[in-house]
Image: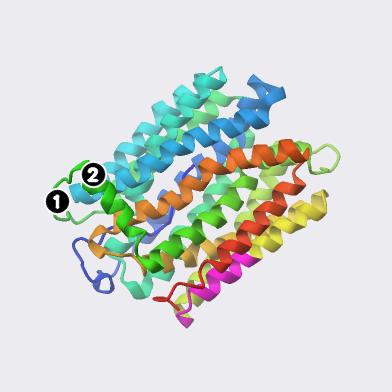
């Protein structure tokens, strides 16, 4: 999974983002639907079915194998996301990339369902990450295309709701097909493909001016140039730190429930995931809506981003202090409040510190390296911490420290309050 910045995109046709046209009534529901489908697949596949499949193939080495698969596949996410964003900028189109990536999810999921070795699972999930990030890069390029700066908080909140909605649906479907991987994978692929068709049929796009191709060296220099921008660089660092801590824990949620948490008698770990995800999702919905609205109302982005990152650290300390089921419930609720607000408001903040409006999708692709890149490192870090410490308590503590560092990283940003 490459966690995206919902509400990114290009402003090639509208050099002044504040002058972007007011979005049509149907755009935000379609963005919610498109992002929900994306997170449905990411959570259901990576969070449940893939973890169970890896455990079924090699139970003794599940932590190391899962970390390897997650890390290697995240490399594909890191590469394909900014490249696909740049290609959509150059073509002046979004819908063909959304449709193509969405439809390609079906064969990728079918291949994953038939994989029966760790090597084949790794290859199949890498392909899945690649096509999903083509879909994701184009989808996350819509808000700056069509939404004025003054409404970015509301638009980002609407798009951000895709995470809690998709997480809940993905957890429920994943739990329902925990004994039938192949059918479950096919269902997830079909959801994304169907949503891609609906989105591209309903969200008519304005063709943006096509842009000439650049030599590979010039493209690499252009990607790096975004990080020389002071505010954008600190936004990148803050996002990377928080995401690293978040995925170091969330990627191993099923194993945490199996090997760390004392579950109520008779409750299976898959059932526990199906309980925690809706709880987290409700909390995310509340904080996403409130965070987006209040950050627009008070015109304060850094305050909300920093406070929500600190709240995430508090949430991570809870299961470190207690392995009880009650502690996990509290963690799920508080973490949902923190992460929902963070993603909604930080997304709005980032769209306000883009170095160049005409390169918005490319630069947001660079920012998405701060989402996908830590996901490469997180599984390896998590597996090493768990292996060396013999449990998951140390993992929660390290993740909390990273969240605090992410909160502090927004302080140097000067162009946004």
Q: SS class of the residue under badge 2?
A: helix
Measured in 3D between alpha carbons, the distance from the residue under mark 2 to the one under mark 1, in whole angstroms, is: 20 Å
**Residue name at image x 67 percent, y 28 percent:** 62
**Residue name at image x 14 percent, y 55 percent:** 209
Task: Looking at the picture, tell me which residue is in the foreground, 196 or 391.
Answer: 391
Looking at the rendering, which quadrant does residue 318 occupy?
bottom right
**How many numbered discs, if any?**
2
Q: Locate residue 232 relative to residue 383 in the image: left or right.
A: left
The answer to whether residue 308 is magenta is yes
In the displayed structure, would residue 365 be above or below residue 62? below
Q: SS class of the residue under badge 1?
A: loop
In the displayed structure, would residue 49 be above or below residue 195? above
Per the rendered image, the range of residues in magenta is 298-310
Q: Main secondary structure of the magenta part?
A: helix
Dot 2 or dot 1, earlier in sequence = 1
**Residue name at image x 86 percent, y 39 percent:** 265
Percent x, y for residue 142? 31, 57
Kindly identify which numbered label has been placed on residue 217.
2
Q: Locate residue 365 relative to residue 186 in the image: left or right.
A: left
Residue 290 visible in the displayed image: no
Q: For the C terminus, give its image quadrant.
A: bottom left
Outermost residue on the bottom side: it is: 298
Percent x, y for residue 122? 50, 26
Kindly identify which numbered label has been placed on residue 388.
none
Name the residue tied to disc 1: 210
């Amino acid at each position: 999974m490459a966690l995206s910045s919902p509400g990114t995109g290009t402003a090639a046709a509208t050099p002044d983002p504040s002058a972007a046209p007011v979005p049509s009534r149907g755009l935000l529901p379609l963005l919610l639907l498109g992002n929900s489908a994306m997170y449905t697949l990411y959570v259901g596949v990576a969070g449940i079915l893939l973890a169970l499949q890896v455990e079924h193939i090699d139970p003794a080495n599940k932590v190391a194998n899962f970390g390897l698969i997650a890390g290697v596949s995240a490399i594909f996410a890191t590469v394909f996301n900014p490249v696909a964003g740049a290609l959509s900028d150059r073509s002046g189109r979004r819908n063909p990339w959304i449709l193509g990536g969405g439809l390609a999810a079906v064969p990728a999921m079918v291949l994953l369902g038939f994989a029966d070795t760790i090597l084949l699972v790794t290859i199949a999930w890498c392909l899945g990450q690649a096509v999903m990030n083509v879909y994701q890069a184009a989808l996350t390029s819509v808000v700056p295309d069509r939404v004025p700066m003054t409404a970015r908080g509301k638009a980002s909140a609407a798009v951000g709701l895709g995470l809690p909605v998709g997480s809940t649906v993905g957890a429920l479907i994943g739990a329902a097909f925990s004994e039938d991987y192949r059918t479950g994978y096919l269902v997830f692929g079909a959801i994304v493909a169907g949503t891609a068709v609906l989105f591209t049929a309903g969200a008519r796009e304005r063709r943006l001016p096509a842009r000439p191709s650049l030599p590979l060296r010039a493209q690499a220099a252009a990607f790096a140039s975004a990080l020389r921008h002071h505010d954008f660089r600190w936004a990148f660092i803050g996002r990377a730190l928080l995401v690293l801590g978040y995925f170091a824990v969330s990627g191993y949620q099923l194993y945490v429930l199996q090997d760390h948490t004392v579950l109520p008698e008779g409750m299976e770990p898959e059932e526990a995931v199906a309980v925690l995800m809706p709880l987290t999702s409700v909390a995310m919905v509340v904080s996403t809506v409130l965070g987006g609205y209040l950050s627009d109302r008070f015109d304060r982005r850094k305050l909300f981003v920093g406070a929500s990152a600190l709240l995430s650290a508090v949430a991570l300390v809870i299961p470190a202090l207690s392995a009880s089921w009650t502690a996990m419930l509290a963690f799920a609720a508080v973490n949902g409040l923190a992460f929902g607000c963070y993603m909604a408001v930080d997304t709005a903040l980032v769209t306000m510190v883009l170095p160049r409006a005409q390169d918005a999708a490319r630069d947001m692709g660079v920012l998405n390296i701060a989402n996908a890149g830590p996901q490469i490192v997180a599984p390896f870090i998590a597996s090493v911490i768990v292996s060396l410490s013999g449990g998951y308590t140390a993992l929660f503590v390290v993740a909390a420290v990273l969240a605090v560092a992410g909160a502090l990283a927004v302080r140097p940003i000067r162009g946004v309050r």
